[in-house]
Amino acid sequence: MNIPSKYNAQEVESKWYDYWMKHKYFHSTPDNREPYTIVIPPPNVTGVLHMGHMLNNTIQDVLIRRARLQGKNACWVPGTDHASIATEAKVVAKLREQGINKSDLTRDEFLKHAWDWTHEYGGVILEQLKKLGCSCDWDRTRFTMDPEMSESVIKVFVDLYEKGLIYRGFRMVNWDPEAKTTLSDEEVVHEERQGKLYYINYKVADSDDVLTIATTRPETIFGDTAICINPNDERFSHLKGKKAIVPIANRVIPIIEDDYVDVEFGTGCLKVTPAHDENDKNLGDKHDLEVIDIFNDDASLNHYGLQFEGMDRFEARKAVAKALEDSGELIKTENYTNKVGTSERTKAVIEPRLSDQWFLKMEDLAKPAIDAVLKNDTIKLFPKKFENTYRHWMENIRDWNISRQLLWGQQIPAYYYGDGKEDFVVAETLEQAVEKARKVTKNNNLKASDLTQDSDALDTWFSSWLWPISVFDGIRNPDNEDINYYYPTNDLVTGPDILFFWVARMIIAGYEYRGEKPFSNVYLTGLVRDKQRRKMSKQLGNSPDALKLIETYGAGGVRVGLLLSSAAGNDLMFDEALCQQGKAFGNKIWNAFRLVKGWEVDSKLEQPESSKIAIAWYQSKFQKALIEIEDHFSKYRLSDALMAIYKLIFDDFCGWFLEMIKPGYQQPIDSKTLDETIALLEDNLKIVHPFMPFITEDIWHYIAERKPEEALIVSKWPETRPINESLIEEFNLASEVISGIRNIRKEKNMAFKDAIDFSVINNEEAPKTFDSLIAKLGNLNAIDYVNEPLDGALTFRVKSNEYFVPMAGSIDVAAELEKLQGELEYTEGFLRSVQKKLSNERFVNNAPEQVVASEKKKEADALAKIETLKSSIKSLQ
């Protein structure tokens, strides 16, 4: 078989992905094996692959591929989220380019455009994930707007409504004036921003008095319906029961008293705008105040804004401030920093707004989810530190605003049959709604045309919170084979930014609709940042093109590059050099394989003792690493697992083992050693495969012709076997001896092809197990065990053992003695400086423990080196 000299990632990756797909290795159906299930955090249907997706999905693929190798029935369900706000914005923008206004379309007409857009652009990210090597069960791909998924969402809404958990209420909500919809509290990001505090004079009716009010939003004076003072504030006791006049609007409003007012803030007086502030709304309800909504849905001023009607709120702020200044009613302004709510999706500043919306009561629903994570450890968060964040949110949970003023999404299944807002029924279908409405109204003549469905859509998260259940059709058919087999799923991999939006809500839905957890473990990844610790974003231009990285370094290189420094929950400082390191690791494995396959075999040769020992050593080394790797996987330390594999293969297999068993120049290798080496290589490929699936599968098939059922992707994860710890310890000493010999050869320019003599004073009484390997790798004539130092030889020490390389006649003894004497004097001076530091009690008592330990190690190393140098000097004198 002709093996290419270089690994061609692009060619190989497409070849093997097609092969895996053809043989349906990713597909899962229920059987008698242990299931291992992951559901993908569904990316937005509008999305394209970015670094966060790369990290998240690489981790999931590592977990699913390892489970597959462990013989589990691995099922990774992919899919996309319809992303109401983001997708509708894209469709609206496209329609605008075509000269079409959304408001001119019927719901059905708009939805046709949305579906056309989704079919054309949606799901691109899933195709891109294939480039990364993601082994999802593509036959199970789901979309949150698929008919059966939507049916599940509607069924849940009706069920929760009938349980009394969903209600319609007129409440203060978060309004996104760009998307023109409400948002839940969790979708609002509070940012600290620099603004101004405006001091405005309000005249007191029937008086020459004025009241000064401090506000950050002068444009809202048109919605003022009262001035509030603290009843205990003596400064304003003379105003009790009086009225004030709103500037510009010239409306007369009452002056009310309430101890809600902070006498220390601003001027001690508060303008009350019940339609545009939640606290003001509470005051308004308490004091029965009028409610005046001054904004249109795009946050421009409506007719209540008088001459400022139609102006954007921020333009109006400047214009109103100017008008107040011109009239002498704006006294002063001050710089003021405050928290401003912004839309998590559109980044628009949120406008508090009174609106009829649908809400889900959360307090009781959340209790099982609190217990599962915080009390009985049924669900584990990795890293554990996120439990505190989870606790804070869950124990202070508020009712969830689940309605959105959008067309793209599941339409709320409430049907109005009368003129009032309370005249409605909730049903899964129009036909069922008609039946319910007939019963309620006792009017059997009611027809479908007499009912009007609520125009709002449900919050996108109201569909994705059912994801682990609905992807297996567990809502519509709660006892079907798939849901009973795959649920609960095993691991969830996601970002901590959606711990509330999605993770907590899925746990809530799991207990409500399956009576058990939706998953056992939640692996929370960090953010991908650049080398300067900045969050990657399009705006900063610091986010590399994910597909370009794969093209440059290969999928394996990128996967390794991402995971080498990606501990759970910690942000990843991404550096493209990491991908180069990953690519280099792949090349190292490739070249090691080519080396092994390039050896000629002589089946008549006996296996050398050195090869026997080398194989026994690497088998134990592999087993020790395997136990460490398994431990890292159990704690979701995938970065550490990869590093353990990296060191095992790069250092132990390529750096030492292949050298140990390599035949002499142009010499054949015995068949037993080669066969055992191939078996060890195959074990290496198995543990690397989850991280670097393409190159490992390619090498696997070059090693031998394999049937489809023998492919690496469905082979068997190595089993743990007994470890010969003493063999590992003995090799550690042997490797230092070999390094010592090589250093002397290098320093003295001794050709490696020339064999040399070698003697040992075995003070350690070390076993001679690795002598054959020391002799081979050091190219020694023999190893002589002696009791006295060898005159005229260079020496080095490993532990208390002394090793001698006879050098008489081949070096300038005088020059060598001068060099060794100089090195001795330097080392003795260094030792004195270290010992001086260690004799200082203040340093020893106050310095960190690891610093003191480091100094003590320097002392020990210097003492050992001095002893060796003195021995070398003595042997040459």
Image (tube, grey):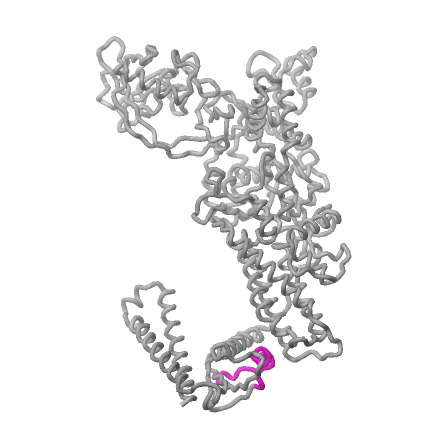
Q: Quadrant of residue 712?
A: bottom right
- Give the left or right position of residue 391, taking residue 221 as reference: right
Count of number-bearing discs: 0
Nearest the camera: 583 or 833?
583
**Residue 97 visible to the viewer:** yes
- Give the left or right position of residue 280, taking residue 178 as reference: left
Nearest the camera: 693 or 154?
693
Q: Position of residue 270 (x, y in %)?
A: 31, 22
- Residue at image position (45%, 91%) is 791
- Residue at image position (54%, 55%) is 580
- Tell whether position 854 is magenta: no
Query: Start and end of the magenta stretch?
Result: 763-782
Q: Quadrant of the C terminus?
A: bottom left
**Location of residue 272 with respect to 1 vertically, above or below:** above
Q: Position of residue 232 (x, y in %)?
A: 25, 24
Farthest right residue?
707
Q: Quadrant of the N terminus?
A: bottom right
Q: Position of residue 75 (x, y in %)?
A: 67, 47
Q: Quadrant of residue 225?
A: top left
**Location of residue 286 with respect to 763 vertically, above or below:** above
**Residue 637 visible to the viewer:** no
- Residue at image position (29%, 67%) is 843
Q: Position of residue 481 (x, y in %)?
A: 73, 42
Farthest top residue?
206
Nearest the camera: 857 or 452?
857
